[in-house]
Amino acid sequence: MKSSKISTVMGKMIDTQKLVFEYIRRDEEGNVEGITRAVDGVDLKVEQGQFIAILGHNGSGKSTLAKHFNALLYPTEGEVYVDSYNTEDDDHLWDIRQEAGMVFQNPDNQIIGQVVEEDVGFGPENMGIPTEEIWERVDEALKAVRMDKYRKASPNHLSGGQKQRVSIAGVIAMHPKCIIMDEPTAMLDPNGRREVIRAARALNQVEGITIILITHYMEEVVDADKVFVMDKGSVVMEGTPREIFAQVDKLKELRLGVPQVTLLAHELRQAGVPLPDAILTRKELVEALKKCR
Amino acid sequence: MLREITLGQYYRTESVIHRLDPRVKIVATFSFIISLFIAKNFIGYVIAGLFLALCIKLSNVPPKFIFRGMKTIFFLLIITMVFNLFLTPGIPLVTFGRFQITKEGLRLALMMGVRLVFLITGSSLMTLTTTPNNLTDGLEDLLNPLKKVKVPVHEISMMMSIALRFIPILMEETDKIMKAQMARGADFESGSLMNRAKSLIPLLVPLFVSAFRRANDLAMAMEARCYRGGEGRTKMKPLIYKKRDALAYGVIVLYFAAIIASRVIL
């Protein structure tokens, strides 16, 4: 049964098949008190080189799902393949973690080094890369996120956005094929958010690294190739940003806001202004309004 | 600005001493401390003093910074000196009622004083000229032989450097929690000692909870970046001995020989 599955997953960066994950709560004696199904039957395919966004409000299971892509959590049921490696295959654990890097929410809790460049070198050090190559990788990674000016700085002196860019550089230095970002902007101010998203987009376009961005900010997913919307552990919507944002009412039901421009266009359309569906940027709205006259 | 606190009081400047391998500096500091206990006479202390003065001069650290560390041991210094001064039996010099200052007492008090001052100066010179990071690296390397007897040397040094990284963060957090509790009427400053100790509970509990959460997050982040202990790990900044380090070892040996000679010959 398994062999037939493996042949179907070739070429996909990430492939989950009927993934279920349950958090089991136990009392002091170890008896099961309750089971929470955080991820419930998710089938998700990500192609190499795509920019993917996963949306969902708090508790929708999106972070739990993300931790499966890096073999930090293992499925209760179903399977997860990362670049055709099954995440439950211990022989390839370190290959998976090297290929699918992860950036977490809190910038302070994922920086290990006391100097920026040392933190970026942490991943390559763990992989056993020779010293000289580590330096090359660190240089290149810091340039990729435009943090090379701060290489000698202490992470404590950086802003939130800069710290997140350092975290991203730390992942890039491991030469991953895919970077999973688990709400990297949730604790940042608007400026920091913009910096991080810009860095992510550049990595996707210039280096061709697959990006999986988990977020609840709608503005950040506008440029994604594909958006998955999660609710109560399952994927409830799937499509291009345009397809997703055309369904303003459904998004509202899921307690997700749409970008302000899209919302404005939606309200205008309901008020009788002949506008096309799913306007994503201010520029588009202006163009569409010009045509109305 | 809690973030500005540099741990281990590292003084950033350029000097030969700063550039020395941390291992050399650790060995030198230990030899210096041992030498202070070997030296028994005036000449020995003069040699130690000259050696220390030379190191301070070479380190480019303003003496003001070096003697700042003295404040913390001031009381210890006074107490040691007073006890030695009055309680050493021998030929009396001055007598106040039941107490007397003896010739031996005076000698011993001075010796202890000088010894303590040198000891603190010597070790703070090490922490002033070496970043905490370098220090842990050096220690890890020096303690490496202990791995054979199953001492988790790599883990200890990793813990030390993580602790160093998180101290400023946790300090800032303490400050934040304190302000939050104060805004809700908590009082940390008045009352009896018992009450003040009790008032720390609403500060410590959230601090510990958050520290554990951070530890959990950090462990996950480290695992995600392929951390799997010291085995098979390479170093971005490996410690490599240079010519000046060999020279420094030579100087240490010479100094040590001089101290021993001062004790044996004189």
Image: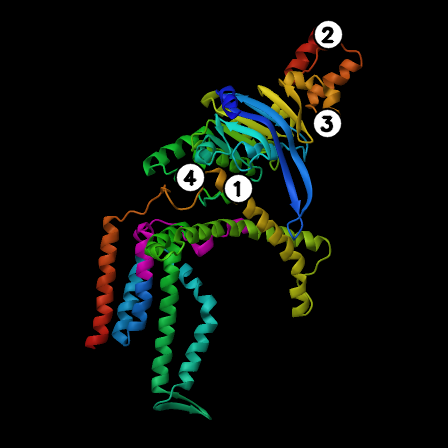
Q: Which residues are magenta?
A: B1-29
CA gap, disc 3 and disc 2 = 31 Å
Who's the residue at 73% across and 56% down the image? B185
Mark 3 highlights which residue? A254
> Between tags 3 and 4, which lies in front?
3
How far across and how far down the image is residue A88, in percent? 51, 34
- Name the residue type under label 1: Met
* Distance between the alpha carbons at the discs numbered 1 and 2: 53 Å
Q: Marks 1 and 3, Cα distance to the nearest angstrom? A: 30 Å
Q: Secondary structure at mark 3?
A: loop
Crowding near the residue tagged with mark 4, few <14, some 14–19, many ≥20 C-alpha atoms within 10 Å: many
The colour mode here is rainbow
Residues under numbered marks 4 and 1 in contact, where contact means CB atoms less than 8 Å apart: no
Question: What chain letter is assigned to the residue under label 1?
Answer: B
Of circles 1 and 2, the one toward us is 1
Q: Which residue is disc 4 drawn over?
A: A117
SS state under label 1: helix
Q: Residue sitting at 79 percent across and 15 percent down?
A: A270
Up-down relation of residue A22 to residue B15 (above or below): above
- Where residue A60 appears, as percent x and y from the top left, is 67, 32
Q: Is residue B250 left or right of residue A23?
A: left
Q: Mark 2 highlights which residue? A: A292
Residue at the spot 68% in from the left edge and 40% down from the top edge? A35
Q: Is residue B13 left or right of residue B213?
A: left
Q: Chain of mark 2?
A: A
